[in-house]
Amino acid sequence: MSKPLSVLQFFKQFPDDDTCLEHLMTVRYGKDRKLACPKCEKASKFHKVSGRPVYSCQFCGHQISPMAGTPFHRSSTPLQKWFYAIYLFTTTRHGVPAKELQRQLSVTYKTAWRMGHEIRKYMADVDGDPPLSGHLEVDETYVGGKSQQVGRPSRKGNKTAVLGVIERDGKVMTKVVKNAGQKALIPPICATVEKGSTISSDELQAYKKLRDHGYIHGYVKHSGYQWTKGIHHTNTLEGYWARLKLSIRGTHIHVSRKYLPNYLAEFEYRYNMRTTPSLMFDRLLASF
Ligand SMILES: [Zn+2]
């Protein structure tokens, strides 16, 4: 397993805005930075223009900005602060609340919130590379709503239904769904899981249709206190749900239905990249 940067290493590698810009250029255009100039169309090496965050073509002087198309471009927040925010997002276990970003970066709460929102959006974009295959577990859960912390809330109420599909020892895919009916659950499973895979679930009626869609399906009866039947159980996904809910409760207090997909994706990204945490940072930068 490759380790992520420590805070000290981070500041050694990115001591100022210029080194961040340089890194962004390398991540986007490769180490030797040879690219076809959009203007003169020659394979050109681009050089940094001093005092400005742009690079210019060695032949015609055409300028390109490595920040173009990224959320850094129109932001008045210095690039190094953005990098550090991304660093925090990719190294923290439970996500970064806006309050924490505000404190660590000395920016306003509004700016911190916006930065977090942008980073999460990109985490969502990089994520999700189906198909999943092998032996998987599927389950649905209910997230959000105000009653979450008090007593035993009703299973639904104002909560949002979320479907989860997880490979044993592999990747996970989660998705907000309308309800726990087969019309809502089966299509996203079919779009994510390779036919012929083995799927374990609980006794929910909808999942029994999985056989008709080319899967080997087995289930346990949670209502009958049956947690394992041969190779079938949903413990991997139950564990994932537990950590997700703990994280939402611990850091985000109240997640609205509108932003829930972003939080789900952020959590998913971190889980799916868990064996290569050092790659997270650059992959995220490259995705912009
Ligand atoms: Zn040129």
Image (cartoon, rainbow, N blue to C red):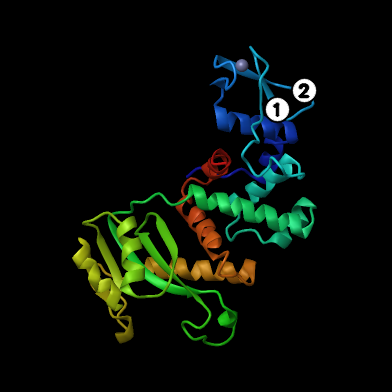
**Alpha-carbon distance for marks 1 and 2?**
8 Å
- Residue 44 is situated, as x and y percent measured from the top left of the image, at 58, 16
Residues at discs 1 and 2 in contact (Cβ within 8 Å)? no
Please tell me which residue is depicted at 56% across the width and 80% down the height of the picture: 148
Q: Nearer the viewer, residue 153 or 230?
A: 153
Please tell me which residue is depicted at 79% across the width and 53% down the height of the picture: 107
Q: Nearer the viewer, residue 182 or 128?
A: 182
Q: Name the image quarter holding residue 171.
A: bottom left
Q: Amino acid at mark 1?
A: Val
Please tell me which residue is depicted at 77% across the width and 22% down the height of the picture: 50
Which quadrant does ligand 1 occupy?
top right
Please tell me which residue is depicted at 70% across the width and 36% down the height of the picture: 14
Residue 64 shows which numbered tag? none
Q: Nearer the viewer, residue 135 or 260?
A: 260
Within 10 angstroms of label 1, few (less than 14), some, or many (20 or more) residues?
many
Q: Amino acid at mark 2?
A: Ser
Q: Secondary structure at mark 2?
A: loop
Above or below: residue 103 compared with residue 17:
below
Q: Quadrant of the C terminus?
A: top right
Pointer 1 residue = 54
Q: Is residue 197 visible?
A: yes
All told, the count of numbered labels is: 2
Q: Nearer the viewer, residue 47 or 273?
A: 47
Above or below: residue 77 compared with residue 111:
above
Within 10 angstroms of label 2, few (less than 14), some, or many (20 or more) residues?
few
Pointer 2 residue = 50
